[in-house]
Image: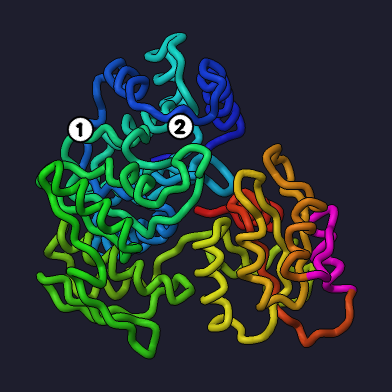
Amino acid sequence: MPTETGPDDARRAHGALTRLTALHPKLIDLGLDRTFDLLARLGDPHHRLPPVIHVAGTNGKGSVIALMRAMAEAAGLRVHCYVSPHLCRFNERIRLAGRLIGDDQLADLLEEVETANGDMPVTFFEVTTAAAFLAFSRIEADLLLLETGLGGMLDSTNVLSAPAATIITPIARDHEHFLGSDLAGIAGQKAGIMRRSVPCFSAAQAPDVMAALDSHAAQIGTFVTAIGRDIDWTPRADGGIGLETGRRRLHLPASSLHGPHQQANMALAASALVSVVPGLPDRSLATGVAQALWPGRLHRLADGPLARLASRQIWIDGAHNAHGADALAAALPAVDGRKWHFICGALDTRPADEFLHRIAPLAASITCLAIPDQPASLTAEALADSARQSFPAARIASSLSGALQALADGPDDGGLPVMICGSLYLAGHVLIQNDSLPD
């Protein structure tokens, strides 16, 4: 399967995406009619997929998928994945039997989709979802881990009649301009991926969210198995967990993914996975959680041009909403119990102060900047104004390298660590500038 391809293939893929998405200028326009129509023109590839675990939720979707993939692959399974957004390059969204799609294969798929679509209106996510399903239908695999893009009920991935299982990760307020601000209403949208007689596994949820999920499940003829209610797990001192799924009793070691919230993600991922693939050996599950990778999420930056600027540990995290900020703030003391230098960027789609005031108690400094090449970014000045509500000494920088250089040139603070956070777009920019592309 090709993974190393030339610049002409990347240009072909980009050109096809540009032409297709220009047919429908709205970036997000929730609904399934266009997706079903496009898939029909392609021969309905979504009917020829390996067993699918479909994942919706607000936070933790990528971590749960990363953990399931690592556990399944440790057992020798071939695993497809579809995730979004990407950090550095589109190829990260489509993983075929364990490897990121190559530019040549991606370009061929997109051009095939373009020919089938003609001049019909279509959005970026609809195009890419159709292309992904086409790829997944043609390459043999044992499992497909499928992440929703936004919501669930009207998300373009929600075209499967019978996935093997569905998962709902923690639900919180996010994308309120599309999904509203009522948590029970948001839960109803996420619950739309459930199917009759298909088991649904849920993270622990707020009572009104859990009630909405249970109600939807009862209406369509399925049930929700909830972590902490129907499945017991206990944290262990070494960072691992003990898990009783009802089918198996498991002892899983500490995950390679940092933060106490990853223990709950491990419980959710393992419970769903052993339901769909019950024969996975305990040893493979343990090996997988200890080796899982999910770039840009509480991730220490590898050696590279940016990492060398500040002469200290640099970490990045894509958390961007209040729930994510809570998880980040809870995780950082275990990584380094000292104060942190925060470098933050954020989009203008949600209140920045909800994120900033949660990290402020851990801050030695907060530096705000605009996310490069991102039209929806808050300006450095606007973000700093929000930060100063909780951290009056917040400052601005004109660039990421400038912010890191200022720390290097500043007073000796014993090498306090740096956390760059506030947006996945910023995390992706960091990885590009540091020559640390995910693979």
Label 1: state its secondary structure.
loop
Residue on which disc 1 sits:
48
Tell me the quadrant of the picture where the N terminus can be found: top left
Left or right of residue 67: residue 163: left
Closest to the camera, between mark 1 and mark 2, is 2
In the picture as drawn, the residue positioned furthest to the bottom comes out as 237
Residue 206, horizontal then vertical, whole percent: 35, 63
Label 2: state its secondary structure.
helix
Does residue 294 belong to the magenta stretch?
no
> Looking at the image, is 306 positioned above or below residue 242?
above
Q: Residue at x 25, y 31 (%)?
A: 46
The label number, if any, that marks residue 317 in the structure image? none
Q: Which residues are magenta?
A: 392-409
Does residue 400 belong to the magenta stretch?
yes
The label number, if any, that marks residue 125 in the structure image? 2
> In terms of sequence position, does the residue under pointer 1 or pointer 2 come before the other?
1
Q: Residue at x 70, y 37 (%)?
A: 375
Q: How many marks?
A: 2
Residues 28 and 388: in front is 388
Residue 232, horizontal then vertical, whole percent: 21, 76
Q: Residue at x 36, y 74 (%)?
A: 263
Residue 91 in sight here: yes
Amino acid carrying label 2: it is Phe
Residue 158, horizontal then vertical, whole percent: 30, 36
Amino acid carrying label 1: it is Arg
- Distance (Cα) linking label 1 and label 2: 20 Å
Colour style of the rendered protein structure = rainbow
Residues 171 and 138: in front is 171
Residue 74 in sight here: no
Residue 278, horizontal then vertical, whole percent: 12, 63
